[in-house]
Each structure stands twice: as C-alpha cells, then as structure tokens.
Amino acid sequence: MLMTLTFLIWLVLVMIGVHVGYSLIIVSLIFFAMSGDLALLPFAFKEMLGGINNFTLLAVPFFVLAGNLMNGGGVTNRIFGFAKAMIGHKKGGLAHVNVLASLIFSGMSGSALADAGGLGQLEIKSMKDAGFDDGFAGGITAASCIIGPLVPPSTPLIIYAVIAGQSVEKLFIAGFIPGLVTTAALMIMCSILSHKRNYPCEPKCSNAVRWETFKKSFWALLTPVIILFGIFSGIFTPTEAAVVAATYTTILGFFVYKELDLKKFYQIVIDSVKTTGTIAM
C-alpha cells in the first residue's frame, strides 16, 4: 500500500512538471517519513553520494565542459565550416552538413545536449536561411544529435559502464558501428527528401578553398584524434581523456581562436555544472 501511494505521489509530481530527479528525492523522503524509519535517511544520502563518487564518472563533467567550451570557443563554427566545404554542394547540402558536423562533434564531446545547444542552433539557423522547412531543419538536427550518445566518447556509455561494471573502452568500440550506421541512414534519408522536395545546395568549393578551410579547422579537427587515439592506445583512461579534451579546448578558445575571455569561460563553467547536476540526478 505504501509503495503504491508513493508511486502515485511521484506520478502526480511528474505530471505537474517537477523535475524527475527532484521528484524522486521528494518521494523518497516521503516514503521514509511515512514508514516511520527515519534512521535510514543518513544511509540513503550516503548511498546517493557514494553512487556518484566514482573515478570513471569524473569523465562526464569534463566531457560536458569540453563540449560547452567547443561551442563557446569557436571550435563548433570551424567544424561546421569544414563540413560545409566538403559536402555542402550535394543536393540538400546543409542537411548533409548537419549530419557530418554532428558526427565530428560527437567524437569530441559525446553529449547530445552539447550538440543541440551549440552546433544545433547554428545548423538550424543556416538551414532556415537557405530555404529549408522549419520542421525538416529541426527534425534532422534533433535526429543527428543522437549520434553523440552512440560514438565515443559517449557520456551515456560511460554511465552505463559504471552501473553495469563493464569496460568503458569495449563499450566505446561497440558504439562505432551503430554511430556510423545511424550517420549513413540519416544522410540517405536527407538525400531522398532533398530530391523529393527540391531542397537547395551550396556552391561547390574549389580544392583551394577546401584546403584553406581545413587549415582553419585543423586544430579543432585534431580534438577527436587526440581523445580517441589516447584512449584506445592506452595512453590515458577515458576520465583522463575528458580532462585532456577540456584542457585542449580551453587552450584553443583562449590562445588559438581567441574567442574566449574570463567572463565567457566563467559562464561556460556554470552552465557545465548545471548540466552535470542534471545528469547526476
């Protein structure tokens, strides 16, 4: 009876818009209060803190921070520009660019939230300005964001590895094929719909322009190489890779692209803390 009542209370809280994490905490407190066994409360809080006190899970906040630094430090814009120069001339070009840029970005942050929050906004605006339907622009952006949780360094795979006691490296390897298949499927769909709806394409870039774009985005494109090579070669663990990614993108933002300042960096850290708190809940 008590379990049924607490479940109904949780259901009501969720339906009125209370965050799932907060609603679970509230329901847990109500359960302990109604059961009369308040002595278990300290144990419950200890277990909650112990659940996130894990070295491997430290990778999550640092990958989130790295993703936000890429968005704020100019890395994202250069990735998008590189993808646009490479395949923007295909039918429905910006839709293909959307998917390819998300794949590259996913190899840096592993977070759908970071993809949607930074790269996604740029992709949608560019597609709408080019004459794509709002629904299609939003739909393909949302769909391409799911590549992030599939390919390494995937934040959900790190969390799953900790919960299930599995190897993070093996899960990362297992995520490659689904991520690439999803990318290919989205591009095929984009091609079909673009021909059917006569979506526009970008002017084809010359090899000289492509080379110039590559040079401008080289340091950004080097990020996933550093992360993945470091992990799979055994140079550092996924957690250490996350720290390296955050440090590297900070250096790019401040000293290479010079699009970060202390005020902007502070806000990025605050946003990353909020996102990490949401994930931890």
Image: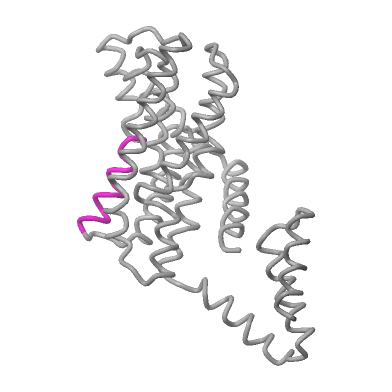
Image quadrant where residue 57 sits: bottom left
x, y percent for residue 176: 29, 46
What secondary structure predominates along the stretch shown in magenta? helix
x, y percent for residue 162: 41, 69
Residue ranking furthest to the front: 1
Q: In the rendered structure, which segment of residues is drawn in magenta? A: 220-233
Which quadrant is the N terminus positioned in? bottom right
Q: How is the image coloured?
A: one colour
Residue ranking furthest to the left: 233
Residue under the point 74% across and 71% down: 26
x, y percent for residue 167: 30, 66
Which quadrant is the C terminus positioned in? bottom right
Tell me if residue 264 comes above or below residue 173 in the rendering.
Answer: above
In the image, 66 versus 144, the foreground residue is 144
Residue under the point 31% across and 18% down: 212
Query: In the rendered structure, does residue 229 fall within the stretch colored magenta?
Result: yes
Residue under the point 68% across and 68% down: 24
Query: In the rendered structure, does residue 226 fall within the stretch colored magenta?
Result: yes
Residue under the point 46% across and 8% down: 198
Tell me if residue 68 comes above or below residue 144 in the rendering.
Answer: below
In the image, 199 versus 72, the foreground residue is 199
Tell me if residue 133 comes above or below residue 58 in the rendering.
Answer: above
Image quadrant where residue 213 sits: top left
